[in-house]
């Protein structure tokens, strides 16, 4: 269930799967487990000590998290895609409420505030806001760049408040990597189970499989590297890192603000399209809603529901630990 929630959150631009891990109470276990994918783990694996490898890397936890996340890409996230397309305001409102709830929850983790913590929140917020105002680049399917996208995009799983999906939008490869390539992979898996290997002669399909494979390798590499760094800094500067994460999340509120309109790029007074005919996103124009409209109050209800969901999850996580 945690994996399903993380997978769904990671696919939505502006929302970080790391927030799910943090509020769900398993963030540090996640980072610690990633950290165990190191030289010692590979030595155990290659010397045939599989049980020791399984225990050392906390493999059961990681397998369940990743299985849930991958399954989510083909199920829960598909539902989210539909809801965003047809009820965009309400979906963003629910996520906005969940982020606010996360700010409250994470803020409670800092007991004795000091000047360094305040500076940490400020720096995190400035970086988060700066990212939200950046303009997206053009799509690039160069495999070296795709590998880099994997490294950067996976930060949403390891850094609460920093959305990997939104970073991929800024890099210009969100549709290529999390929509088109995932859909091609899904079709390929179905073909393999049906015993249909005709796709091996399909140059377009093979291209997408190379892209999704390279992206996966970049993500795995990024997870291992960032988890080593995060485990190191969390151990030594836990409260300061928590303050930075809180700042990131506060800064990301601008990205998730529900009342916004997509602004698309134009070239020579004509709407700019990518190679697949999709409109190229430039940025979002945010606005203050009209409180006289019923739609606004429904959206506010969803914001309150989002806050309640996070508080209930944190309450459940706290009490389950006591049990």
Image: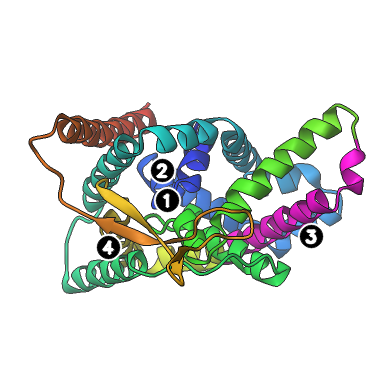
Q: Is residue 90 above or below residue 282?
A: above
- Foreground mark, 2 or 3, reads 2
- The percent coordinates of residue 45 (x first, y second) are 80, 52
Q: Residues within 10 Å of mark 2 (few under 14, many from 20)?
A: many
Mark identifier at residue 20: 2
Q: In the image, what residue occupies the spot 78% across and 36% down?
A: 189
Residue carrying label 1: 16
Per the model, the C-alpha gap separating discs 2 and 1 is 7 Å
Residue carrying label 4: 247
- Foreground mark, 4 or 1, reads 1
Picture quarter with the C terminus: top left
Q: Determine if residue 294 is in view.
A: yes
Mark identifier at residue 307: none
- Whichever of labels 4 and 1 marks the residue nearer the N terminus, that label is 1
Per the model, the C-alpha gap separating discs 2 and 3 is 32 Å
Q: In the image, what residue occupies the spot 35% across and 42% down?
A: 23
Q: Is residue 219 magenta?
A: yes
- Whichever of labels 1 and 3 marks the residue nearer the N terminus, that label is 1
Question: Element at badge 1?
Answer: loop
The magenta stretch spans which residues? 197-225
Per the model, the C-alpha gap separating discs 4 and 1 is 14 Å
- Foreground mark, 4 or 3, reads 4
């Amino acid at each position: 269930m945690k994996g399903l929630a993380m997978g769904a959150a990671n696919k939505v631009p502006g929302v970080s799967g790391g927030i799910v891990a943090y509020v769900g109470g398993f963030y540090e276990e996640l980072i610690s487990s990633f950290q165990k994918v190191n030289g010692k783990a590979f030595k155990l694996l290659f010397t045939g000590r599989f049980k020791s490898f399984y225990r050392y890397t906390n493999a059961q936890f990681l397998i369940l998290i990743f299985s849930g996340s991958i399954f989510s890409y083909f199920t829960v996230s598909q539902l989210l895609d539909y809801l965003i397309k047809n009820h965009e305001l309400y979906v963003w409102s629910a996520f906005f409420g969940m982020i606010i709830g996360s700010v409250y929850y994470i803020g409670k983790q800092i007991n004795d505030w000091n000047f360094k913590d305040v500076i940490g929140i400020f720096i995190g917020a400035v970086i988060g806001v700066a990212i939200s105002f950046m303009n997206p680049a053009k799509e690039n399917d160069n495999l070296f760049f795709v590998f880099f996208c994997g490294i950067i995009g996976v930060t949403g799983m390891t850094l609460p408040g920093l959305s990997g999906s939104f970073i991929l939008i800024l890099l210009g490869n969100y549709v290529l990597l999390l929509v088109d390539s995932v859909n091609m992979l899904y079709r390929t898996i179905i073909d393999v189970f049906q015993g249909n290997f005709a796709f091996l002669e399909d140059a377009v399909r093979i291209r997408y499989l190379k892209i999704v494979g390279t992206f996966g390798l970049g993500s795995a590499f990024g997870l291992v590297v960032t988890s080593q760094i995060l485990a190191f800094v969390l151990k030594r500067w836990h409260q300061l890192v928590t303050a930075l994460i809180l700042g990131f999340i506060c800064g990301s509120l601008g990205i998730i603000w529900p009342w916004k309109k997509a602004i698309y790029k134009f070239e020579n007074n004509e709407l700019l399209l990518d190679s697949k005919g999709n409109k190229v996103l430039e940025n979002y124009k945010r606005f203050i809603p009209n409180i006289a409209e019923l739609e606004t109050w429904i959206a506010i209800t969803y914001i309150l529901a989002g806050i309640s969901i996070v508080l209930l999850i944190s309450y459940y996580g706290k009490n389950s630990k006591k049990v």
